Image (tube, helix red, strand yellow):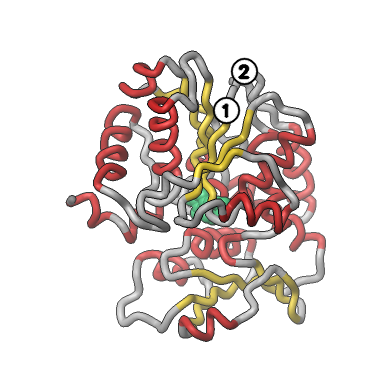
Amino acid sequence: MKEISFGHLLKNIFLKRNNMEILSHLTIPSPVTQVKTQWSEAAGIELYLKRDDLIHPIISGNKWRKLSGIFDHYARGDYDSITTFGGAYSNHLVATAASCAILQVPCKGIIRGEEPKNWNPVLKMCALYGMELQFVSREAYKNSNRTEGVIQRVLHIAEGGAGQLGTIGCQDIMRETDTSSINKIFVACGTGTTISGLVTYAREVALSSEVCGVQVLKGDGYITNDIKQDYGIEGVTIYDEYHCGGYAKTSEELIRFIQDFTRETGVLLDPIYTSKVMLAIKKCCVNGSIKKGEKILAIHTGGLTGWFGKSAELDQ
Ligand SMILES: Cc1ncc(COP(=O)(O)O)c(C=O)c1O
């Protein structure tokens, strides 16, 4: 598949002009890999992965895509530092910490829940990259204002990098990829920010591929509602039945699926997002939502640090 790097070049020039040398640390555009598994071969589909997991070991996948839109904005504004939010295993927090270390931007992470006696590997890594951590009770966290905004020259980034700035960076996933022969594009949905970026770009340039989302949290139709409310996006196919028990939950079926997929392709899936997307694709092949001969592109949105909290589940 051909990589189109025009958008990337523009951003590259802009970021360099602003002393944002971060792009020399990242693999952008990310490659596209074809993978073959027993089930994809049996279904007669061509399966491709957009390898955003390869962008960076820690600033991977859609974390970077969202942050790129946010750092673009940071570079243009008059800010002193960044503050952001998340749970103790947040991919977004550690990706922000690593990006800020490269860019030498002071940053603070506000963590949901009391400080644990022993910090987990994600928290330790945030601190290793120089992020200041502040723990707040679940109650105080719930009641705090955690939206995108500015307070006294501090740029506040919403949980998970969600928000309008995040969607802008996510458009690059499509911009740098040749999807002309692809029938369907699948991506994981947590807040819906990433899919909103993909759909916005796809509609702007009238892509013929259909963008489909897989909800990784329980909740009938919540992504459909949220993307309509937050970004005015309607008419997108969102599968809300492949969450495997809910956010950050795994089923025995999912763990077996990840093991088989990893052995068959050599591509490691994270346990929270892309693994559920791939399992959904397999199920769609079986139930006829994906037809023989179709070319499917799944976005590997990275997040492999998710295994820090989930490795025990491989013992199942
Ligand atoms: C690795 C990974 N993939 C996918 C998603 C889902 O993205 P979004 O919240 O933009 O729907 C997230 C959460 O941000 C994530 O960490």
Tell which of 260 and 267 is nearer to you: 260
Residue 81 found in image quarter: bottom right
Tell which of 284 and 121 is nearer to you: 284
Graded by Cα atoms within 10 Å as few (under 14), some (14 to 19) or many (20 or more), the crowding at tag 1 reads some
Graded by Cα atoms within 10 Å as few (under 14), some (14 to 19) or many (20 or more), the crowding at tag 2 reads few
Image x and y of residue 153, in percent: 76, 77
- Say if 145 sits above or below 251 in the image: below
Mark number, residue 184: 1
- Name the amino acid, label 1: Lys
- Left/right placement of residue 294 relative to residue 166 reads left
Q: Secondary structure at mark 2?
A: loop
Residue at 74% across, 79% down: 151
Residue that protrudes farthest toward the left in the picture: 315
- Name the amino acid, label 2: Ser
Q: Is residue 43 visible?
A: yes
Residue highlighted by disc 2: 181
Distance of mark 2 from mark 1, alpha carbons?
A: 9 Å
